[in-house]
Amino acid sequence: VFLNANALLQAAATGSGVRWQWRFNGVELPGATNAALALEAIQSHEAGAYDAYAWNAGGSAFTAPAQLTIVQPVFFTQPLPASYQTNGGSNVTFTVAVAGTAPFGYQWRFNDVNIPGATTPSLSVTNPALEQSGIYSVVVTNPYATVTSSVALSIVIRPVITNGLTAFSVLQGSTFTLSIVAGPSHPLAPLWYRWLRGGSPFPGSTTSVPYIVITNYFTTNLQSSQWRVGVTNGAAPSGVFSPSAGSVIVTMIP
């Protein structure tokens, strides 16, 4: 039976005036003097051998012992964290701990696909690259249940800007776009872009896309403005900038 479950043991005898006594591991149970024995919210210490003996004026007889075994569905005592982030090339090991009734079976998965040979409580991801970002999970079974725990692993790599900001001119009141090309990026390890004008954050300047649209452009600062963008992620929280020093000039044409 399961831990905390209820159980009912029953015995039968023929004859008149039959009386009963239940025993647990050979010791009489106080008050257990009916043909049935009800066990409620069973605990581990109640596992063992139960029997009963019946008697009347004609004599006595014992039942065969009934072995009560208590089992538990598998459950996690140490599940995986919801998410984990590390730099590219830094080894990662995930470990879970479970309890319940053995034996336990383990199967690790990456993005819902079984990882061959990954059938122990631990999984190591060695020298991880960006493409190894994803959802890692472990399915644990015992004869009575199946449980799953998952972690979103983000591999972050310092951004590289391959096409940075360049200076140009625009007409007063017009719309223009500032954009760069940077990488690498992954849905679980995205890049963020922080746009600066004159050294200060531009309103709405932190974006998840590598461009910003400026509408109705106007400046009184010598008909030009200075722009810079910082690309950030977990490997470069302070940013990789374009240009790497100074700013690019956007000149306004009256």
Image (cartoon, rainbow, N blue to C red):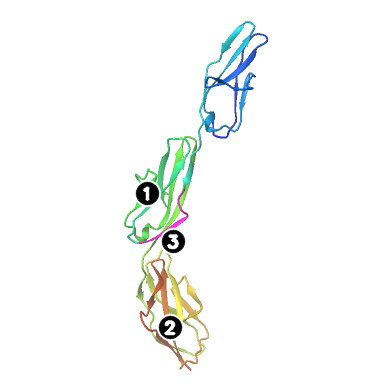
Residue 211, percent from left and from top: 45, 76
Residue pictured at 45% horizontal, 75% vertical: 194
Residue 94, percent from left and from top: 40, 51
Q: Nearer the viewer, residue 112 or 153?
A: 153
Bounds of the magenta span?
Answer: 79-87
Q: Which residue is mark 2?
A: 227
Q: Secondary structure at mark 3?
A: loop
Mark 2 neighbour density, 10 Å: few (under 14) some (14–19) many (20 or more): many
Between circles 1 and 2, the one closer to the viewer is 1
- Choose top left, top right, bottom left or bottom right for residue 224: bottom left
Q: Is residue 84 magenta?
A: yes
| Position above or below: 20 against 230 | above
Amino acid at dot 1:
Leu
Rounded to the nearest whole Å, what is the CA distance between mark 3 and mark 2?
29 Å
**For marks 1 and 3 on the same chain, the one whose residue lies earlier in the sequence:** 1
Q: Nearer the viewer, residue 246 or 42?
A: 42
Q: Nearer the viewer, residue 178 or 130?
A: 130
> Furthest residue to the top?
58
Q: Which residue is mark 1?
A: 123
Rounded to the nearest whole Å, what is the CA distance between mark 1 and mark 3?
20 Å
Amino acid at dot 3:
Leu
- Choose top left, top right, bottom left or bottom right for residue 236: bottom left
Residue pictured at 65% horizontal, 14% vertical: 19
Q: Which residue is mark 3?
A: 188
Residue pictured at 43% horizontal, 49% vertical: 137
Mark 1 neighbour density, 10 Å: few (under 14) some (14–19) many (20 or more): many
Amino acid at dot 2:
Trp
Q: Quick check: 134 left or right of 34?
A: left
Between circles 1 and 3, the one closer to the viewer is 1
Q: Is residue 69 magenta?
A: no
Mark 3 neighbour density, 10 Å: few (under 14) some (14–19) many (20 or more): some
Q: Secondary structure at mark 1?
A: strand
